[in-house]
Image (cartoon, rainbow, N blue to C red):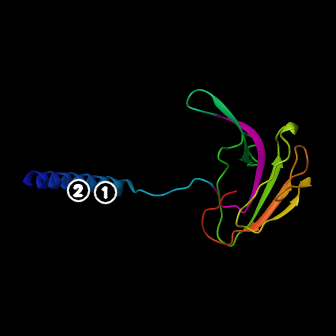
């Protein structure tokens, strides 16, 4: 019985020492949570495109994704996952989508669950919203960021 108490006390002492060490380093490093994203805007220009993701075994997967078009930098490659946009509650958000995929890829659209979205432009009505086909005019989505939190698209 005494041996068990000593082991328990030793485990507790090691855990307390480790916790104190972690807290000391965390306090000196100024730990913080952070999400990298595009912020400071309410209008975003996206392009739907095709890309390739490398995987650990040396292979790759093809994917469809979105690219944030910084009009000063030109066209690059789509991101996986797509770009994070950061806006303030109450902002009216506009996303202009251009489909830059190959014609054989078909039409594409964006969906913003939990938001009342107005879609204008595009080339056809899709199952859930308007769609944009390759080589056709851009599609514009507008909604109000009505609640704080993280949303997906």
Span of residues in magenta: 38-53
Q: Along the line of sight, which residue is nearer the eye, 28 or 125? A: 125
Q: Nearer the viewer, mark 2 or mark 1?
A: 2
Q: Is residue 141 magenta?
A: no
Element type where label 2 sits in the image: helix
Image location of residue 142, percent across then percent down: 79, 64
Q: Decide: marks 2, 1 in contact (CB < 8 A)? A: no
Give the mark, 2 or 1, whose residue is nearer the N terminus. 2
The residue at which mark 1 appears reads as: 23
Q: CA distance from mark 2 to mark 1?
A: 11 Å
Q: Is residue 75 visible?
A: no
Image location of residue 16, percent across then percent down: 23, 56
Q: Is residue 52 magenta?
A: yes
Q: Which mark is residue 126?
A: none
Image location of residue 55, percent across then percent down: 59, 33
Q: Main secondary structure of the magenta part?
A: strand
Image location of residue 40, percent across then percent down: 66, 61
Residue lying at 67% horizontally and 34% vertically, measured from the top left: 61
Circle 2 Cα neighbour tier, 10 Å, few/some/many (<14 / 14–19 / ≥20): few
The quadrant in which residue 5 appears is bottom left
Residue lying at 52% horizontally and 56% vertically, measured from the top left: 34
Q: Which mark is residue 16?
A: 2
Residue lying at 72% horizontally and 46% vertically, measured from the top left: 67
For residue 100, above or below residue 91: above
For residue 93, above or below residue 110: below
The quadrant in which residue 100 appears is top right
Q: Is residue 26 visible?
A: yes
Split into 4 quadrants, where in the image is the C terminus?
bottom right
């Amino acid at each position: 019985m005494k041996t068990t108490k000593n082991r328990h006390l030793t485990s507790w002492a090691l855990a307390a020492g480790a916790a104190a060490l972690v807290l000391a380093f965390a306090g000196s490093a100024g730990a913080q949570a952070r999400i990298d994203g595009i912020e400071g805007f309410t209008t975003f220009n996206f392009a739907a495109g095709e890309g390739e993701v490398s995987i650990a075994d040396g292979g790759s997967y093809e994917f469809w994704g979105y690219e944030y078009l910084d009009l000063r930098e030109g066209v690059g490659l789509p991101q996986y996952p797509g770009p994070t946009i950061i806006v303030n509650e109450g902002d009216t958000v506009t996303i202009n989508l251009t489909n830059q995929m190959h014609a054989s890829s078909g039409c594409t659209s964006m969906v913003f669950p939990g938001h009342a979205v107005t879609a204008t432009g595009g080339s056809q009505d899709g199952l859930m919203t308007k769609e944009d086909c390759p080589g056709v005019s851009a599609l514009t989505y507008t909604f109000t960021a009505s609640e704080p939190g993280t949303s997906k698209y």
